């Protein structure tokens, strides 16, 4: 008996594998598109300028990316269980073309597992690997999608015949597939509340629960972790506006409070998928930059008091800093801004990832 012949379950079946493969194709395709949106919103090339509207665009796309990725895990495990006897075929390859085909499948399976495992660890804030997650996740996505496209092209005709042909073996595939899809749906239901606020109580698998945290909003990085507890409370703190300006400004907290105040309701949308809305009050960023005489086409670099970190600064392009809802926030949900939410002053703007909503602002540089 061959090694493959030892796997006797009738659910190691091409028809089941074809249905699961189509579901995975949709899932990975969606994750790839929403992942590119997230990457290019955080690291936009010079030619790409994201609009500030719709306000919740990033919240929805990143929520779909993370929640959909979690829902993919049961699908991938079921698919691998269905097809893994083929991995034990002997001889391992019959020709150069067959060796290349199996190498492609190795890339596809290995890359898919890498994306889902490291993505799960990332949203759990556990980094046991030595590489930078964002870079590895981004480039591996191209490998997975490239291998997936070639695999689909190779298998499409056979999968289509398998799916369209009426089976006559009496095998109850429907119950197996329904169980797998129900598991995927359950993961979605227990996670979607991290993005859809009315379902927040169901977000049992979410790393952050909307409504739980200082002033009713979660935080990822506290003031203690950022090392700013003393500098943020320093009464000598000033917000510096410099660079391409007609006049440099040094604004105290009292100066900011004396300027016209505006209130907006905007979400914090984290790259880990969770999001929560708050009511923010502060000074419009465009009012401060206009007072300094910043050119209308200037890029603005927002700098934090924290000494280091990949997101100590963020770029604010003209579409965002001129938006009337982009604030230098001084209060949240009717209370003075908590230290963990960026006291004395933080950036809050529509349609931006949470890591770009810079906290503990100290300098605005027009470039």
Image: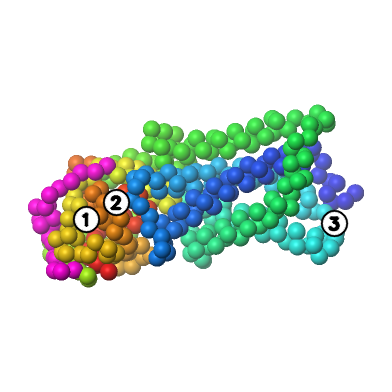
Split into 4 quadrants, where in the image is the C terminus?
bottom left
Whether residue 139 is visible here, answered yes or no, is yes
Q: Which mark is residue 90?
A: 3
For mark 2, does the 10 Å Cα neighbourhood hold few (<14), some (14 to 19), or many (20 or more) residues? Answer: many
The residue at which mark 2 appears reads as: 349
Display coloring: rainbow
Question: Is 253 a magenta residue?
Answer: yes
Q: In which quadrant of the rendered view does residue 13 lie?
A: top right
- Which element is circle 2 on? loop
Q: Position of residue 58 (x, y in %)?
A: 40, 48
Looking at the image, residue 71 sits to the left or right of residue 177; the answer is left
Query: Where is residue 288, by image quadrant?
Result: bottom left
Marks 3 & 2, CB-CB < 8 Å contact: no
First reached walking from the N terminus: tag 3 or tag 2 = 3
Q: Closer to the camera, 51 or 267?
A: 51
- CA distance for labels 1 and 2: 9 Å
Q: Are marks 1 and 2 in contact (CB under 8 Å)?
A: yes
- Dot 1 lies on which element? helix
316 sits to left or right of 71 = left
Which residue lies most toward the bottom here?
243
Q: Position of 305 compared to 249: left or right?
A: right
Q: Read off the residue under disc 1.
A: 285
What residue is rendered at 13% in x and 65% in y? 250
Left/right placement of residue 45 relative to residue 151 reads left
Image spot of residue 7 (x, y percent) = 81, 44
Label 3 sits on a secondary structure element that is loop
Residue appearing at x 77%, y 40% in the figure: 161
* Residue 301 drawn at (x, y percent): 29, 65
Q: Which residues are magenta?
A: 245-265
């Amino acid at each position: 008996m061959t090694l493959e012949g030892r796997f006797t379950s009738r659910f190691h079946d091409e028809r089941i594998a074809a249905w699961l493969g189509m579901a995975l194709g949709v899932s990975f395709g969606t994750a790839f598109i929403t992942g590119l949106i997230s990457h290019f919103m955080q690291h936009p090339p010079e030619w790409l300028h994201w609009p500030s509207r719709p306000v919740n665009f990033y919240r929805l796309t990143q929520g779909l990316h993370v929640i959909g990725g979690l829902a993919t895990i049961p699908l991938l495990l079921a698919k691998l269980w269905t097809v893994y006897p083929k991995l034990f075929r002997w001889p391992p390859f019959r020709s150069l073309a067959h060796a290349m085909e199996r190498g492609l499948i190795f890339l596809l399976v290995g890359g898919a597992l890498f994306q889902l495992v490291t993505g799960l660890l990332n949203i759990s804030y556990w980094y046991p690997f030595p590489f930078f997650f964002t870079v590895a996740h981004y480039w591996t996505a191209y490998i997975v999608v490239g291998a997936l496209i070639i695999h689909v092209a190779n298998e499409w005709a056979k999968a289509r015949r398998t799916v369209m042909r009426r089976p006559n073996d009496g095998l109850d595939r429907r119950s197996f597939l329904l169980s797998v899809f129900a598991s995927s749906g359950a993961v979605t239901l227990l996670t979607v509340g991290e993005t859809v606020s009315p379902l927040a109580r169901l977000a049992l698998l979410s790393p952050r629960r909307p409504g739980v945290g200082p002033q009713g909003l979660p935080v990822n990085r506290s003031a203690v972790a950022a090392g700013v507890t003393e500098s943020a409370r320093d009464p000598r703190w000033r917000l510096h506006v410099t660079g391409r300006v007609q006049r440099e400004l040094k604004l105290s907290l009292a100066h900011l409070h004396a300027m016209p105040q505006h209130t907006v309701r905007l979400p914090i949308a984290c790259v880990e998928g969770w999001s929560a809305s708050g009511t923010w009050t502060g000074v419009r960023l465009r009012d401060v930059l206009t007072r300094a005489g910043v050119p209308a086409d200037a890029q603005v670099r927002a700098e934090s008091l924290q000494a280091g970190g990949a997101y100590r600064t963020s770029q604010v392009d003209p579409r965002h800093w001129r938006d009337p809802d982009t604030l230098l926030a001084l209060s949240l949900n009717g209370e003075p801004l908590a230290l963990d939410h960026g006291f004395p002053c933080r950036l809050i703007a529509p349609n931006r990832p949470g890591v770009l909503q810079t906290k503990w602002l100290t300098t605005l540089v027009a470039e």
